Image (spheres, grey):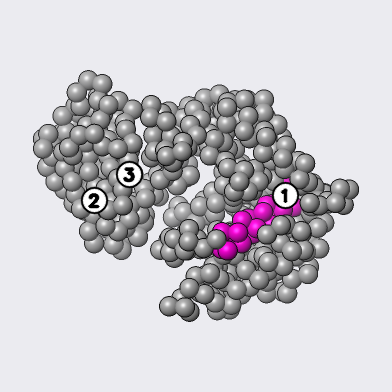
Amino acid sequence: MRPTGTGPGLTEGKDRDLDGLLVLVARGDESAFSRVYDQLAGPVYGLIRRVVRDPAQSEEVAQEVLLEVWRAASRFDPAKGSAATWVMTIAHRRAVDRVRSAAAAAEREQRIAMPVTGTDDVAAAVEASLEQERVRRCLEGLTELQRESITLAYYGGYSYREVAGLLKSTLGTIKTRIRDGLIRMRDCMGVSS
Amino acid sequence: MKLLRADVHSLTGAYAVDAIDDEAENDRFERHLRRCQQCTGEVRGFAETATRMAFAAAEPPPPAMREHVLAAISQVRQLPPVTEHGRPPVRAFWQGRLPMLSYAFAAACAAVAVVLLIALIGTRHQLDRAQQRDAALAAVLAAPDSRASTRTTSAGGHVTLVYSLSEHAVIFASNGLPAPPSGKVYELWLIGPPRVRPAGLLGSGAPGRSGPVLARGAVHGDDFGITIEPAGGTSKPTTNPLVVIPLRT
């Protein structure tokens, strides 16, 4: 239970609202879907953009993800997590699939050569929210290696193997840093474990 | 052994952010996850945490996207719920195959949905999908453990498989297979020691050549089979296979 007023943008009330909307979507309620779209299209697109970078491809992947939400809504199980997380998990996986597919191999080479975006990008995102502030603050509370590992893995879509290569560290270290970092982030953001 | 387990457990973070790119390692971790409640809880907590990070990266999508998506949903059939037996209701077109397929290929297999979607979103997507499918086929063909096998079937004609267990995928094609009896289809199966999983349908009314059909989720020890089933397919084979091909490396 988070205190009201100081909670992040993603409040429990909103969470429950989304959960309920998704149940309606599973029954074919198109207007419920448009409300889900309005709540989640921004985070879905923004997350995919971070990973995929190219705006046209990001838009394609985002559309696929949102259609998948419509198509597979009956598979959402509130007992296993929130609706937002169900959707974001699909979005992240699709984005990662896109950048890891063989067709994207060449582009990926270029992507690796691009400078790594730091957490400042998060702050630059258009939708200013408490959530954003909170994530930024929590990321700042991590060690540098934890922060870079998580940022590259989640926002960059890199595998932990690739992260180890980029940060010139061992696989075991990166694996552990991602986990330790996520534990800290989770506790910092008050996600119940 | 103990060391190995601790090592597997430390993958919870990488798993939650899709950072395991080795499929064998990913499968190993998912098997561990099914037995490890603590890991399951940890992965869920991490996934919720990652969701906050996604919200922090929110960006307004291109304005036209809303209209596209809302127009497209009326053309996309929804999946039935998973029933208590872990399978969708019997008459559902999609049957129990879908959970087996990755999200990426579920769309490719749902031909109707895809065709309509493509019509709506345009030829650029069509190209993109073809490329993705090509990429998927190419991945199987180019896998170091890729194998090919051709057999004649008891109904005549022959079927060819190219498969890779590291890619967990089978490409199926047939030549000279007679058209199925009216109201029937050819259904493909992955036949594993634990259970038999539907692996796709061949387009009906297509004698001569058919395929390639990409079936995902093949694992070590599977055989591949084809049977004649009622239109729409079934979740379990109801007739004897015309041919069974072991997927061996």
Q: Secondary structure at mark 1?
A: helix
Mark 3 falls within which chain? B
Q: Which mark is residue B197?
A: 3
Which is nearer the N-term, disc 1 or disc 3?
A: 1
Q: Is residue B72 visible?
A: yes
Structural distance between the alpha carbons of marks 2 and 3: 10 Å
Direction front: furthest residue: B84
Q: Residue at x 72, y 37 (%)?
A: A17
Q: Nearer the viewer, mark 1 or mark 2?
A: 2
Mark 1 falls within which chain? B
> Which residue is nearer to you in this view: B99 or B132?
B99
Pointers 1 and 3 within a single chain: yes
Q: Secondary structure at mark 3?
A: strand
Q: Which mark is residue B55?
A: 1
Residue A100 location in percent, x, y? 49, 56
Q: Residue at x 64, y 59 (%)?
A: B46
Q: Is residue B85 left or right of residue A184?
A: left
The residue wearing badge 2 is B223
Residue B195 location in percent, x, y? 31, 48
Mark 2 falls within which chain? B
Which is nearer the N-term, disc 2 or disc 3?
A: 3
Q: Residue at x 72, y 74 (%)?
A: A144
Total numbered labels placed on residues in the image? 3
Q: Is residue A148 left or right of residue B157?
A: right
